[in-house]
Amino acid sequence: MAKLDDIRPLIKEKLLQLGMELYDISYHRGPNAVLKVFIDRDGGVSIDDCEAASAELSTLLDVENFSGSPYRLEVSSPGADRPLRSQRDFVRARGRTIRVIARMPDGRQKTVSGEVLECTEDHLELQTADQKIEIALPEIQSAKIVFSFK
């Protein structure tokens, strides 16, 4: 029986073959066990993408003998309000307004909202209402896109 850490790289590789990427994965045990796989791709995820990934992953998980007991596989997009975690997430959010909670070097927590200008391996650059600021990626505790409905 394979463990989640054992199958994560296999799932990631299978999704890459399908032109998708693994955003997150979780497994909830119990009588109604669920393996949740969140996928992403440039341009967004469609229902057809979820169906294709589900079919391929189902076969992979059977071959790898993922669980010794019944479970349900759910494949979906992480959604529009997903947390931004990686440099790639911030690059994709370029031009969008995000809200960032960061731990500053002095230990204080700071919340900043601004438009994503750039993201390198080390820093995120935002344009706030009155200034450009840089935040070191390791200092970011959470970040999400800010949606405005007009």
Image (spheres, helix red, strand yellow):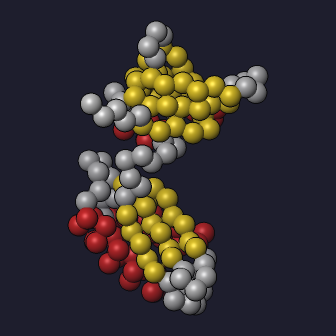
Return the x and y of residue 89 as percentages of the image width and height: 43, 41
Please indicate whether residue 1 sits to the left or right of residue 125 in the image. Answer: right
Q: Is residue 40 above or below residue 52?
A: above
Q: Is residue 121 above or below residue 57?
A: above
Q: Is residue 41 visible?
A: yes
Residues 2 and 108: in front is 108
Return the residue found at the far top: 130
Residues 108 and 147: in front is 147
Please indicate whether residue 98 sits to the left or right of residue 104 in the image. Answer: left
Question: Residue 88 lies in what quarter of the image?
Answer: top left
Q: Is residue 62 above or below residue 90?
A: below
Which image quarter is the C terminus in?
A: top left
Residues 83 and 41: in front is 83
Q: Is residue 122 visible?
A: no
Q: Is residue 118 above or below residue 35?
A: above
Which image quarter is the N terminus in?
A: bottom right
Return the residue found at the far right: 106
Marks counted in the figure total 0
Residue at the location (45% across, 66% down)? 37
Residue at the location (47% across, 69% down)? 36
Return the x and y of residue 40 as percentages of the image width and height: 36, 55
Residue at the location (58% across, 86% down)? 31
Residue at the location (29% across, 56% down)? 45
Return the x and y of residue 135 as percentages of the image width and height: 57, 24
